[in-house]
Image: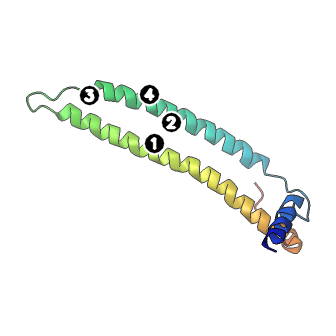
Amino acid sequence: KKEKDEKKKDDEEDKGPPCGPIACNDKITSLQSTIKREIQELKENLNMVTLWLQLQIPQIEDGNNFGVAVQEKVFELMTNLRTKLDASQTQISKYLSDRGDAVAKAAKSPHVVKASFFMLPKI
């Protein structure tokens, strides 16, 4: 019985929404691809600068470690930036996933899709 229910559920998901295919917003899609590309380039540049900075850290001699402290602080800031960039990439994927879930839920109720069409913001 469980297998039959799972097969029926899979068949329902493969059919698509009863209201027909739902087009994605071309503006959002193009902006997301641009942002993804920019984030990737920024991460690559950040990796190069981080490597260069690590190679420039001088040896601590005679207690004069002011330059080392400054470089370590900059390295810490760059690490924080890398973390934020990773979070931004995750948010883009999460947005697409959440939007897909919302469309899937709305597609199960055709009367909701018609009403929600007018509530979606026009970009």
Rate crowding at label 2 as few (under 14), some (14 to 19) or many (20 or more) other CA atoms within 10 Å.
some
Q: Earlier in the sequence, mark 3 or mark 1?
A: 3
Query: Which residue corresponds to mark 4?
Result: 48
Which quadrant holds residue 66? Answer: top left
- Specify the quadrant that holds the C terminus: bottom right
Callout 1 crowding tier (Cα within 10 Å): few <14, some 14–19, many ≥20: some
Q: Which mark is drawn over residue 82?
A: 1
Q: CA distance from mark 4 to mark 1?
A: 12 Å
Q: Which residue is mark 2?
A: 43
As helix, strand or loop, the secondary structure at mark 2 comes to helix
Residue type marked 4: Met
At x 62%, y 41%, the residue is 36
Label 3 sits on what residue type?
Ile
Separation (CA) of disc 4 from disc 3:
15 Å
**Residue drawn where x is 86% and y is 65% of the image:** 12
Give the Cα separation between the discs numbered 3 and 1. Answer: 20 Å
Q: Quadrant of the N terminus?
A: bottom right
Q: Which mark is residue 3?
A: none
Residue 118 visible to the viewer: no
Residue at image position (86%, 58%) is 14
Observer-nearest residue: 5 or 83? Answer: 5
Residue 56: horizontal and vertical position, in percent? 29, 25
Q: Amino acid at mark 1?
A: Arg
Examine the image and state in which quarter residue 121 appears: bottom right
In primary-sequence order, the first of circles 4 and 3 is: 4
Question: In screen coordinates, is 75 left or right of 64?
Answer: right
